Amino acid sequence: MKLKKPKFWDYKKPNFLSNFLFPISKFYELVLKFQPTKNIKKINSIKTICVGNIYIGGTGKTSFSIELMKLCDKMQIKACFIKKFYSDQIDEQKLLEKFGKTFINKSRSKALDEAAKNGFKIAIFDDGLQDKSILYDISFVCFNKKNMFGNKRIIPSGPLRESLDNLTKYKNVLISGNQNNQLSIKSFFSENFGKLNLFNSSYQPINLNNFNLEKTYLVFSGIGNHNTFLEMLTQNKFKIVKDLEYPDHYSYSKRDIKKILELAKSLNAEILTTEKDYMRIGENFQKEINCFKISLKIDQLDEINNKIKKLYESI
């Protein structure tokens, strides 16, 4: 059974439970620091872009990876996705496959070998920042504006997969969400991590015209950041009468979906979920559930486009 993310991870200050778990986090940090790296992969015929995160889940990695693929397509660069196989992430794999060739393997290194053999020139890794078996040409660290760093502690006392100090070696940061206070965010990164390439982005609905906003909706999701999904719906004037939150990458059973359908019927409400969740509910139920589709709008698109162009030209 998958568990939801602990709420105390996102408290501004660590609470008692976080302090209790802190020694384990420090031990884990040491393990990461002294983890041996063997057989580091670097293939000259293919360039690599890693889209990862330090905050665990809900940071927009997949959406950003798709936007990078769109840029490659416009430049007619033969690019592909690489995704490590996880049985509970079939939704992300299916979503990537809609936009480009996707190599899926339990070993990212083997997937990269396969991509190179098939003549691809750029490989976009959806996740893999902490995989030290590959020397990436460019790395992006994604954050969601709503949660940012949480309580700034490493798991299990916080939501971070590694120390924030490592941002200095990754160099590129993408922030998704409402960017009302861009200057303060930029100032914070500059003061704490030195010179970083900071990119801003926001989610945009792409099928809003498909919905009747006079109706009421039951909303559910099992993604990394359920509240971001709710905020987007609220901003677009959806009338939400009930929302259900499940753990990230939740595998819905027939019983789960039937309960959702029965609850929606009792509320006289339409049902709405994310594109990722839609791919996990089974084809038999998809006709009864609405899918809310989004894309990621990147402010500094030309700058990222130039990065990809220079990377390709360096092959």
Image (cartoon, rainbow, N blue to C red):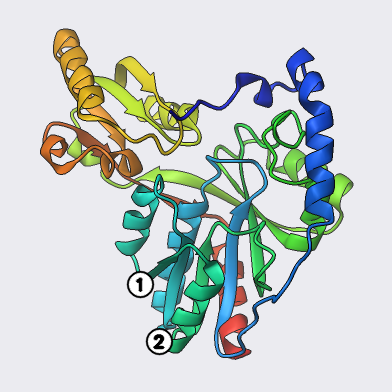
**Residue 206 seen anywhere in this rendered image of the structure:** yes
Asked whether 287 or 259 is in front, the reply is 259
Asked whether 188 or 219 is in front, the reply is 219
Which residue is drawn at the image coordinates 85% and 46% (left, top)? 30
**In the picture provided, is 208 more to the left or to the right than 164?**
left
- x, y (%) of residue 95? 34, 55
- x, y (%) of residue 169? 80, 62
For the residues labelled 1 and 2, the Cα–Cα distance comes to 11 Å
Which residue is drawn at the image coordinates 32% and 38% (left, top)? 277
Question: Which quadrant of the structure image shows residue 88?
Answer: top left
Helix, strand or loop under label 2: loop
- What amino acid type should be assigned to the residue bearing mark 2? Asn
Helix, strand or loop under label 1: loop
Asked whether 180 or 278 is in front, the reply is 278
- What amino acid type should be assigned to the residue bearing mark 1? Lys
Residue mark closest to the camera, 1 vs 2: 2
Task: Determine whether 39 is above or below 289 in the image.
Answer: below
The residue labelled by disc 2 is 118
Task: Using a 10 Å C-alpha cutoff, classify the residue at mark 1 as few (fewer than 14 neighbours), some (14 to 19) or many (20 or more).
Answer: some
Q: Could you say which disc has been placed on residue 101 in the image?
A: 1
Do residues under tags 1 and 2 come within 8 Å of each other at their CB atoms? yes
- x, y (%) of residue 115? 45, 80
Task: Determine whether 66 is above or below 242 in the image.
Answer: below
